[in-house]
Image (cartoon, rainbow, N blue to C red):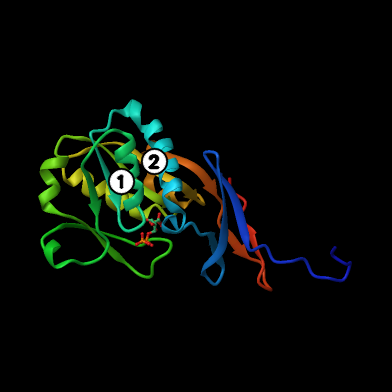
Amino acid sequence: MMTQNEPPRAQTSWTVDVAGYELTLPITPVSPDRAIALMMITDLGVSFGEHIGAALAERFRPLEPEIVIGTATLGIPVAIEVTRHLGLDRYIILQKSPKKHLADALTHSLSSVTSHGTQELRLDRAALPLLMHRRVVVVDDVIATGSSFMASLALARQASAEVVGLGAILTDGTAWRRKLGVDAAMVQALAHVPQFRNVGLGHWEPIVEE
Ligand SMILES: O=P(O)(O)OC[C@H]1O[C@H](OP(=O)(O)OP(=O)(O)O)[C@H](O)[C@@H]1O
């Protein structure tokens, strides 16, 4: 039991219901004054992948997608599971790291919430025939600034794909809405987490959203 003089304990985690699957996420600083509830899908096992794949596929099914695009790295398991649950086979991964075999790839720059500096997103030209005039959904684990989805959308459209949906497990804060503009209306997410501001002494407080 807390005594009167004891300072309140810093909140270190955030619990969120992801379409019926409860996650407790560590509040993790991404800058001196900002923190996020960090979800690492690669730490959550295959049952979580199965769960989110089924839930996102259910949302996308009415859109009749023909192929799924996923954004590396943490969007890869999402793309695989959504593809599987839609009864599709092929999926396309946009790479964030430079590869010798992608030297002539289509590229678009981005700056995401959890990585330092500017990155390049790459679409392998070999994938272009799979995307041309196809109905596609673009998936990722999280959408925060919206920069990764913005770059994925630009590459998909450059490949003449018809983007019919955008999907993420989590929306993180609200900056992505401004960044994506009208395309924000296509976002399907299974849950939302706030971002956190530094209120000193190791305390993080959820930022009130409009
Ligand atoms: O909306 P945004 O601000 O773009 O943030 C979301 C992106 O950030 C993370 O990727 P990151 O670039 O850190 O690469 P990773 O998947 O390899 O960790 C995450 O997996 C999303 O792709």
Q: Identify the residue position indicated by label 1 in the image.
A: 80
Answer whether labels 1 and 2 touch (C-beta < 8 Å): yes
Q: Position of residue 138 (x, y in %)?
A: 31, 43
Residue 177 appears anywhere in the view: no
Per the rendering, the mark at residue 146 is none
Disc 1 residue type (three-letter): Ile
> In this picture, is 64 found above or below 205?
above
Q: What residue is drawn where x is 32% and y is 28%?
A: 63
Q: Earlier in the sequence, mark 1 or mark 2?
A: 2
Disc 2 residue type (three-letter): Gly
Is residue 166 found left or right of 26 in the rendered image?
Answer: left
- Residue 2 occupies quadrant: bottom right
> In this picture, is 25 found above or below 163?
below
Q: Position of residue 182 (x, y in %)?
A: 37, 39
Q: In the structure shown, which secondary structural element does the residue marked by tag 2 occupy?
A: helix
Q: Identify the residue position indicated by label 2 in the image.
A: 53
Q: Front-most of 60 and 187?
A: 60
Few, some or many residues within 10 Å of mark 2 (<14, 14–19, 20+): many
Q: Position of residue 38 (x, y in %)?
A: 50, 59
